[in-house]
């Protein structure tokens, strides 16, 4: 019985120490950067069109091409957050909006799948440039 009591006390002590450490860590962490809502909205559409197209399924892209363009246009019109390089980001967003317009036009023109895949891949690459290299480096 004495061993069980000691084991219980040790367990409670370890849990308390772990809880205190977790609480301390959470209190000292810097708050996460705000999410760029327009970027998140665009990504939601991009991911549901690009990834199926990679696998040869162009139906989502054909269905959502106007929505993809609209999301790019809204994102382009939104203010660039401080953690992004403003000139580089704005330029890339303009290219993305134009490329998404090209995707939509190709869908409307009933272009072949190879053309659609090329265009959505280019748009996807621009998206990744914005979400990656357009960010200011951490200091």
Image (cartoon, rainbow, N blue to C red):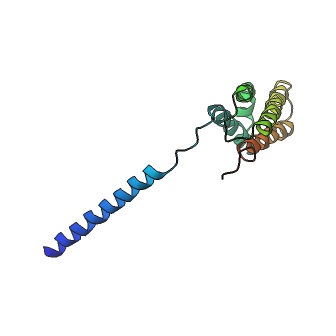
Most foreground residue, 130 or 27: 27
The residue at the point 80 percent across, 27 percent down is: 104
In the image, 7: left or right of 66? left
The residue at the point 86 percent across, 25 percent down is: 109
Image x and y of residue 121, in percent:
80, 42
Residue extending farthest left: 1
Residue 109 seen in render: yes
Image x and y of residue 28, in percent:
46, 52
Residue extending farthest bottom: 3
Task: Tell me which corner region of the image, top left, top right, bottom left or bottom right, holds residue 54.
Answer: top right
The residue at the point 69 percent across, 29 percent down is: 79
Residue 56 seen in render: no
Task: Tell me which corner region of the image, top left, top right, bottom left or bottom right, holds residue 59.
Answer: top right
In the image, 60: left or right of 2? right
In the image, 50: left or right of 107? left
Image x and y of residue 10, in percent:
25, 69
Task: Tell me which corner region of the image, top left, top right, bottom left or bottom right, holds residue 5.
Answer: bottom left
Q: Is residue 49 above or below residue 78?
A: below
Most foreground residue, 6 or 113: 6
In the image, 77: left or right of 116? left
- Image quadrant containing the N terminus: bottom left
The residue at the point 83 percent across, 37 percent down is: 119
Number of callouts: 0
Image x and y of residue 113, in percent:
83, 37
């Amino acid at each position: 019985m004495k061993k069980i009591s000691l084991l219980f006390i040790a367990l409670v002590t370890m849990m308390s120490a772990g809880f205190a450490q977790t609480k301390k860590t959470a209190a000292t962490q810097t708050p996460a950067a705000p999410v760029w809502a327009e970027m998140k909205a665009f990504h939601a559409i991009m991911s549901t069109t690009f990834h199926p197209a990679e696998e040869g399924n162009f139906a989502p892209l054909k269905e959502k091409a106007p929505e993809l363009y609209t999301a790019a246009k809204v994102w382009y019109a939104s203010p660039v957050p401080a953690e992004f390089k403003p000139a580089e980001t704005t330029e890339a967003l303009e290219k993305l909006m134009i490329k998404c317009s090209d995707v939509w036009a190709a869908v409307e023109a009933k272009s072949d799948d190879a053309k659609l895949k090329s265009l959505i891949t280019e748009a996807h690459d621009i998206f990744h440039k914005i979400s990656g290299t357009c960010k200011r480096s951490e200091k």
